[in-house]
Image (tube, rainbow, N blue to C red):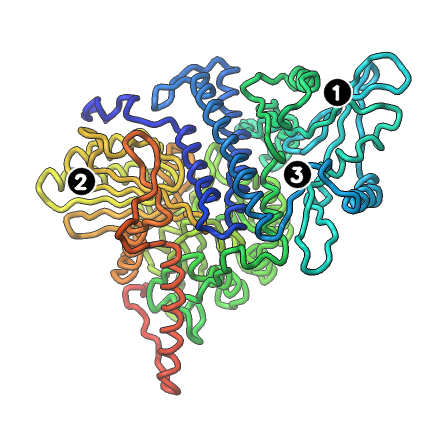
Amino acid sequence: MADMDEKYLEPENYVNRELSWLEFNYRVLSEARDKTLPLFERLKFLSITASNLDEFFMVRVASLKDMVHAKYNKADIAGLKPGEQLEKIAVKTHELVGLQYSTYNRSLLPALKQNGLLVITSHENLDKKDGEFVDKYFKENVYPVLTPMAVDSSRPFPLVRNKTLNIAALVQKKDEDDTIDFAMVQVPGVLPRIVELPREEGEERAVILLEEVIERNIQSLFLNYNIITAHPFRIMRNADFSIDEDEAEDLLIEIEKQLKKRQWGEVIRLEIEEKVDKRLLKILKKELHMSSSDIFEIAGPLDLTVLMKMYGLEGFDSLKASKYTPQPVPALMNEDDIFTNMRKGDIFLHHPYQTFDPVVNFVKTAARDPQVLAIKQTLYRVSGNSPIIAALAEAADNGKQVSVLVELKARFDEENNIIWARKLEKAGCHVIYGLVGLKTHSKITLVVRREEDGIRRYVHLGTGNYNDSTARLYTDCGIMTCHPQIGEDATAVFNMLSGYSEPLSWNKLIVAPLWLRERFLKLIRRETAHARAGKSARIIAKMNSLCDKKVIASLYEASCAGVEIDMIIRGICCLKAGVPGLSENIKVRSIVGNFLEHSRIFYFENDGSKEVYMGSADWMPRNLDKRVEIAFPVEDESLKEEVIHILTTELEDNVKAHLLQPDGSYEKEDRRGKVSVNSQDQFCQEAVEKARQQLEGQETVNDRVFIPVENPAYKK
C-alpha cells in the first residue's frame, strides 16, 4: 500500500462498520414493512430485526463499551473513536426501535385483526369470559412455576439473567407505613409466551402474551402487599468474551467457564415498557448501572422475537409464503454411488435451491464403505440433531480414521459445539480444537479411499456450514471433487490444523491467514493493470460483509483505473459507491429475501480468461488475518458458467435488491417499465426445471445402459 495514492486511504472515504450494519437491519425491516409480502412473512422479518439487534448489542456494542472502559481511543477506518461510535449508534438504534414498533402497532396488528387473528395487547382489554379463562390458566399452569422476589433491607436486588423477560413492580405493605419496595418476577421461558384464548370454530382467533397474563394476576404473588405499578423489562448483557489461549490448559474447560459468565456480564441495554413509573425506572437504572442512552422505552411487547412463535401458529398457511422443497442435484440423479459420480467430474451444489442431502450422504456413505480409510472434516456450526455427527461417530465405530476439527469459539454455538466435541471423542474420533489465536471457519471434508489404482481423495468444499437445518434457509454453494491436486491440498490443510505442518507449496486452494489476502489483492491489482492497458477488466464479488481497508483501497484504485466493479454484499459495507473521482465505477447491491444470502463468490474478468473462486471468507480483517479460511477455484468450464449465471442473475434482481447510494443510504430499484426479476424465486424455478429435465431424460432412455466415463484428469 506504500505506493498507493493517499486519497484512497482517507477516513472520509469509508463508512463505519457498526452504522453500516444498522443500515442492513433497516433493509430487513423494510421487508417487514412491504405490504406486497404475505402478512406472516412480514412478522418473520420483524422478528429477525429484533434477533439481529440483540446480537448486535451483546457483541458489537459490548465490544465498543469495553474499549471505552479500557480508554482505548484508536479511531476506526471512518475516523470514529469508540465513544463517538457509541453516540451515533445510540441515536440510530433508538430510531430503528421506534420504526420497529410503529410497523408492529400501526401496520401489522390491524392487518392481523383483519385476517382473523386478534392480538390482545393489554390484559385490561379482556372481556369477562376471556378474563376468567386467563385467570384459570394462570392458576393452573403459570403460578406454580413463578418465583416472586421482593427487595428490602434483608433481601438484595436479584441477579437478572441476560435476555430474560421480567416484570418489575413497586409494592407497599398492607396496613403499614408509606415505604415503597421493589419486587420482580421472571416470565418463565419454559412456558409458551403466546397463549391462545378459546374460540368456537369459525370465530376470530385471539391470543395474549404470557407477561400480560402474569401482570393481570401479579397481586396473587405478593399477597401482603398492594401493587402500586408493574411493568415488563428486559436486559441485554455483554456476551463478548476473550480467552488467553496460551494460558488455557484446556480450551474446552476454559470456554465452558466463560459461557457461565456470559449470563452476568455488564448490562448494556435495558428495554422497558413505555410510560413506566419514573420511580421504578430510577431503581432499575441505579441497580443495573445504566446510562439514559442505553434505556429503550418500548411501545409494545418487549422482545419481538416472539413473532417467530406467532409465525408458527397453525391455520394461517394462506398468509405465509409457500414452502419450497430443495431439489435433487441432476448430476446425482442416477443409480451410481457418490464416489462413482465424483469420478465423472466436479459436481456443483447450490443450496437451498438444491438439496443438502448429497453432503450428508457423502459422509454417511464414506462411514459405511469398506474401502474408505479416513474421513477428515471441519465443523463450525452444526444442527441440533446432526446426521453428519452421527455418521462421523459411525465411521469411527467402523474402524476408520476420523479427524474432526470442532471450532469451540463459534459465537453463540460454543455450548452446542462442546457437546458435539465430547460425543465425537467418546465415539473414538480424533477431535481437534483448532489453532491458537485463530478460528477455523473453513468448510472442508476429505475422504481417503483405497481403490484398484491406488489411494484416491474425495473432497467437498463449501461456502456454508455443515448444518442440514440452516442449509434450507441460507444460500450457499459447494463443489464435490476428486481432483488430485485439490486432494493433496486438502490433506495439507488438515495436517496444518492437526500438526502445525505447513507444506512448501499449494496447488489449488488459497488459505487464510497464510496468503488469501495477498492473492485477492493481487487479483484486484491485475484487473487494474488490464484496465490501464486498455484490456477488458471487471470484478464481481459476492459476500456477506466488506470492511477491510486494504481491499477497499485497492477497489477504489481499480475503479479509478476504469475497472467495472459490481459488489453483491448482504450486510456490512464500509465502501462508498458511486463517488466521483473515487468509486464511480463501483456499484453495490444488497439482496434481502426469503433466504439468507450467505455464499461468497468472486469473479475476475482477466482480459477474457475468466477466473471464478468461491469460499468461506468475507473481505474482513478477521477472515483474512485471524481465521483459517479456504477459497477454491471453479475450473470446470460448465460449472464456471453456472456460477457466473448466479452472479449475473443477482445483478439483474430488481425486486429484492437494495442499491447503495453515494450518500450511504440504500434504495430499491425503480421497476417501472421493467420486467420484475426476483433472483431467489428464479433459482427455485431453475432448480425445479433442471431436476424435471433430468428425470424426463432418464425416462426417455428406457432400458439402455450407460457406463460412466471417468474424467482422465482425475486419475492419479
- Distance from disc 3 to disc 1, alpha carbons, whole Å, reads 29 Å
Total labels drawn: 3
The numbered mark, 3 or 2, whose residue comes first in the sequence reads 3
The numbered mark, 1 or 2, whose residue comes first in the sequence reads 1
Q: Which quadrant of the view contains residue 455? A: bottom left
Which residue is at a point 80% across and 35% down the rendered structure image? 217
Q: Is residue 178 left or right of residue 569?
A: right
- Distance from disc 3 to disc 2, alpha carbons, whole Å, reads 55 Å
Which residue is at a point 84% across and 28% down the rendered structure image? 222
Q: Which mark is residue 121?
A: 3
Residue at image mark 2: 563
Q: Amino acid at mark 1?
A: Phe
Find out whether the residues at labels 1 and 2 contact each other: C-beta distance under 8 Å. no
- Up-down: is 441 above or below 397? above
Residue at image mark 1: 157
- Asked which secondary structure carries label 3, the reply is loop
Q: Residue 115: horizontal and vertical position, in percent?
A: 58, 52
Is residue 527 something that shows in the picture? yes
- In what quadrant of the picture does the C terminus appear? bottom left
